[in-house]
Image (tube, helix red, strand yellow):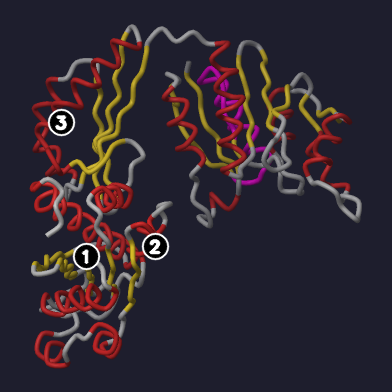
Amino acid sequence: MQYNIIAIGSELTLGLSVNTNAPFIAKRLGQEGYSCNCQVSIPDNIELISKAISKSLEEADGVVITGGLGPTVDDLTREAICDALACELEYQPWLAEIIKERYGPRTTPLPEITYRQAYLPSGAKPIIPTIGSAPGIILEKEGKFVISLPGVPREMEEMIETEVVPWLNTRYLINEAYKVRVLRTTARTEASLEDSVKDIMDSLKNVAVGIIAFPGEIQLQLLARGQSEAEAEAAIKNAEARFIERLGPIIFGFDDETLEEVVGTLLKQHDLTLSLAESCTGGLTSKKITDIPGSSDYFIGGIISYSNDAKINLLNVSQQTLARQGAVSAATALAMAVGVREKLGSDIGLAITGIAGPGGGTSDKPVGLIYVALSHQTTSYSNKYVFFGSRDIIRLKSANAALDMLRYYILDNIRAIGGAVF
């Protein structure tokens, strides 16, 4: 089965919001064996939305729409579906009662506009919301389907899992089985990663491999096909094993695993605590660490030492080091790592200093120059990086480089001796 995705909202076409719904839908339905032909964003305009729906139904078996189902005047998806399919909107009093219940007890009546959400295209089946108030829509006509979901990610995702996937699976028999596996790596570039594994890629049968770059990581995305689930599973396991053997620890995780999750697991496994000293990243690395539930088991805290005075007063970086080497230097990064470890009493101190831009660079110290240092009792060392991109991208790459440096340190030094902390 092939389908198109339409994301509705002028905020998307104006660049004010990022469309995260379409990738989720494509990935989730892809896991069931359904192929997305294309993804488009359409502004809040009935005529344009209607044309996109009609075009999708000409090209594919159906369309999945996200957005435009709320109660306000710019929520036009219901009307556009009717325009595309030549049907009428019909008020559903029972659905209005459910919507009213979703808002809970109130001292004042709901605005009448709220009940726009109780209108459905004739013949449509509603998806009753359990999160939010906007019902989804499933409609079949002439062997094609239209599925319309709210634009709020949590609401959309819940409907995909509980209603859309089961509904599609009752109507479409997939003749092939699909398996998807993502290998997440810290390779520096797409080209370098492809050069390392191209012979494996070329030799694989029934497994398609994509190499996709993200700030701070490069992914190998594997899609295996087979006549049965077992056949697809065997193909993807074989491919995965070959890539793991070739790349080793450059692969830090799989599927949805993040670098901060992997690092947190290693710290916890080996009973290690961590503290961070950040300059140019401004606390981003600490945020990534503390985004992980349970990180208080191993993360002591962080110090954002943006100014030289903060480095001196909070981390005991010497004035002589700053005067001779500068704030962006290996010596300063090392002093910051030692300082935060001693100040907060952690097993490991990790520090980042650099020039995130867009200004502040020189010929000797360009924008993107980053130093990361690690201190663990008697062992301290630093790495130098030069990253390219916007200020946000450089900061994100710097945070990921620090986490990866910590990961390699644990793998190379602590895991190698059976987990003992030295």
Q: Nearer the viewer, residue 303 or 54?
A: 303
Residue depth check, mark 3 versus mark 1: number of the one nearer the observer: 1
Kindly identify the amino acid type of the residue bearing the numbered disc 2.
Answer: Lys
Residue depth check, mark 1 versus mark 2: number of the one nearer the observer: 1
Left/right of residue 88 with respect to residue 354 in the rendered view: right
Q: Earlier in the sequence, mark 3 or mark 2?
A: 3
Q: Indicate the quadrant where residue 162 lies.
A: top right
Write the residue at 20% across / 77% down. 336
State the residue position of label 2: 287
| Vertical placement of residue 38 versus 367, above or below | above
Question: In which quadrant will I find the C terminus?
Answer: bottom left
Q: How many marks?
A: 3
State the residue position of label 1: 347
User: How far is disc 3 from disc 1 in space, using C-alphas?
Assistant: 33 Å
Q: Indicate the quadrant where residue 227 lies.
A: top left
State the residue position of label 3: 243
Magenta stretch holds residue 52: yes
Label 2 SS = helix
| Vertical placement of residue 274 versus 58, above or below | below
* Magenta residues (range): 43-65
Q: Nearer the viewer, residue 382 or 65?
A: 382
